Image (tube, rainbow, N blue to C red):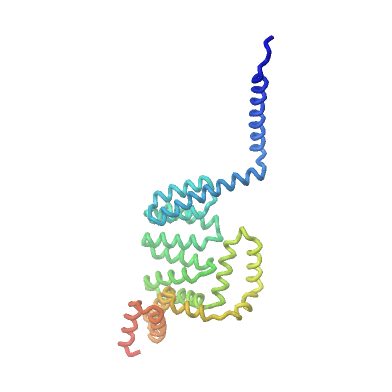
Amino acid sequence: MSKKKPFDYITPGVIYGVWTLLIVFGIMTLLQPKWLQEIGDQGRIEEALGIKEHADLALKDRRYARAIKLYNDVLRIDPENNDSIGNIALAHRELGHYDKALNLLTKLAKKYPQQAHLNYLNIAEVYKKKGNKEKTAEFYIKSSRVSPEPDYALFRAANIFMELENYDKALELVSKGISFRTNFVKRYEGMLKRDVLTLDEKPEIKETLLNQLESESYKKDLKLYDRTFFASTLRKDRDLARAYNIKGICYYYLGDLKEAKSNLSIAFKINPNLTESKKYLNLIEKSGI
């Protein structure tokens, strides 16, 4: 029997050590220890975020096909990344793939009801691209009904009804939007409701805001605020100017020239570049009002 050399002892030990390590990692993989899973999850999240940054840039640069590909790469890593799904829908919309965009946005609205108002807005924009004014208005109204800040959707729905010459409906909607936009307390309440929808990962803050909303304690606190800044923002709010312009035109065609002049004057004061307001004001002046 030949004498064993040193490596005859070392080699079996090394091989055994390798197999032991493989077995241990195999067991760990099967058992999915929490710390190991968290490391893996964090790595996937970071990878998905990195790809999403490139996708967002592609979308911003209007490279829509490239953006769709990258967002799909994100979804392969993180299937619940609803922002990526929404942005794929927007890219399809810009490419003229309206049915694909509507399908994705409709599913998102059902799956994530806390963001339904945003998805309804985007659905309205798809129908607007398709030239379907009735459906556009329908989804703007749907958005306004579930939105914590309904004024944006109300203004746009009113504009569609004005184009359809349904001045009564347009007047109703734009008046609601203006009432919300110009009310300091309602705007603050809307902001709180909006924030509640985005704070699922911060339950303590969410609970505090919900308590404020339920008790309406914020209304007492708001009495201490100086509203000068709020008033100054309204004087420069061009979206609000367009809303007053819609309201004035509606009153004009409904035959109430006094109210028409009042609202058109507010619109023109906020935004002197609103030539449409000036045109209707001139018509009213010629009538002797």
**Horizontal arrangement in the rendering, residue 223 relative to residue 67 (left or right):** right
Between residue 189 and residue 107, name the one nearer to us. 189
Relative to 175, residue 33 above or below: above
Relative to 6, residue 203 above or below: below
Between residue 130 and residue 147, name the one nearer to us. 147
Relative to 224, residue 194 above or below: above
Task: Say which residue appears at 66% left-offset and 19% top-offset.
Answer: 6
Among all residues in the image, which is located at the extreme left?
A: 286
Task: Say which residue appears at 37% left-offset and 73% top-offset.
Answer: 165
Quadrant housing residue 194: bottom right
Q: Which quadrant holds the C terminus?
A: bottom left
Task: Say which residue appears at 36% left-offset and 79% top-offset.
Answer: 272
Relative to 30, residue 63 above or below: below
Task: Say which residue appears at 49% left-offset and 75% top-offset.
Answer: 181
Residue 249 shows up from this direction: no
Residue 85 locus on image (x, y percent)? 48, 52
**Horizontal arrangement in the rendering, residue 209 relative to residue 245 (left or right):** right
Residue 217 locus on image (x, y percent)? 65, 75
Between residue 113 and residue 31, name the one nearer to us. 31
Q: Which quadrant holds the N terminus?
A: top right
Residue 14 locus on image (x, y percent)? 65, 26
Residue 3 locus on image (x, y percent)? 68, 13
**Horizontal arrangement in the rendering, residue 155 relative to residue 279 (left or right):** right
